[in-house]
Image (cartoon, rainbow, N blue to C red):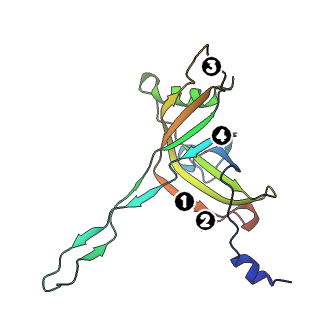
Amino acid sequence: MIPNEVKENLLYPLHVFRFHVEFQTDSLTTGGGENMPLCGGAFSECTGLEASMEPKVIKEGGRNYGDAQRSGPVTFSTVILKRGMTTTRDLWKWFELVTRDNGYAYRLAAIVRMYNNQGEERLAWKLDKALPIKFKAADLNAKGSEVGIEELHLAHEGLSLVNTSSSGGKKQ
C-alpha cells in the first residue's frame, strides 16, 4: 500500500483530449465578487495557453562573467478554440456584442478544465478578462465530407492555474 503523501507525488500524465471550456461572468463585469457560469462547450482543440516573460538584462560595471537577469513584462498568447459547427450561436453573439457599433467590450473569464481517465477534474487554467478578437465560421465545400469547424480567438489579460474543485477551488 502506498502512503497518501507518496501518492500525491506520483506523476500521471493527463490526456490532452479530456478537457472542457466554460465561460463565466468576470467579477469585473458583474460588479461583485462572484463569477456566474454563462455557457460552456466541448471544443475539439484549444491552443495558446501560454505566457512568456521578457527578461531585463542589466549590464553591471566590473561584472565580467555575464549580465544580471531580472524579470520583465509578461505577455500572453492568443488562445484559439475550435469546435464542430453547431446551430448554437452563443460564441458568435458574444463576438457580435463586442464588435457591433463600437459596443461595450464585454469581458468573460474562460476556464479550461482538464480531466483524468476517471473523469475527475485534475487541472484548470483561467483566462482573465477574455475578449473575442476573431470568429471564423467553417469553410463551406460541397465536395467535402468532413465536419465543419468554427474558431474563436481570445485575447486575455491573465493566465492562472486554479485548484480543482476537489481541492477547494482556491488559486495555486
Q: Residue most toward the front?
A: 143
Quadrant, the N terminus: bottom right
Question: In whole angstroms, how far apart are the C-alphas of marks 2 and 4?
Answer: 24 Å
Question: In whole angstroms, how far apart are the C-alphas of marks 1 and 3?
Answer: 40 Å
Nearer the observer: mark 4 or 3; the answer is 3
Nearer the observer: mark 2 or 4; the answer is 4
User: How dense is the environment of label 1, judged by Cα within 10 Å: few (below 14), some, or many (20 and up)?
Assistant: some
Q: Residue most toward the right?
A: 1
**Residue 141: x and y, percent?**
58, 16
Residue corresponding to mark 2: 171
Residue corresponding to mark 1: 160
Q: Cβ–Cβ below 8 Å for labels 2 and 3? A: no
User: How dense is the environment of label 2, judged by Cα within 10 Å: few (below 14), some, or many (20 and up)?
Assistant: few
Q: Earlier in the sequence, mark 1 or mark 3?
A: 3
Q: Cβ–Cβ below 8 Å for labels 4 and 3? A: no
Question: In whole angstroms, how far apart are the C-alphas of marks 4 and 3?
Answer: 21 Å
Quadrant, the C terminus: bottom right
**Residue 97: x and y, percent?**
52, 28
Residue at position x 74%, y 83% in the image: 5
Residue type at the position of mark 2: Lys
Instruction: Please indicate whether residue 32 sits to the left or right of residue 77 in the image.
Output: right
Residue at position x 73%, y 61% in the image: 165
Question: In whole angstroms, how far apart are the C-alphas of marks 2 and 1?
Answer: 8 Å
Residue corresponding to mark 3: 144
Instruction: Please indicate whether residue 21 sits to the left or right of residue 103 in the image.
Output: right
Residue corresponding to mark 4: 43
Instruction: Answer above or below: position of 2 versus 54.
Output: below
Nearer the observer: mark 1 or 3; the answer is 3
Residue type at the position of mark 1: Ser
Q: Cβ–Cβ below 8 Å for labels 2 and 1? A: yes
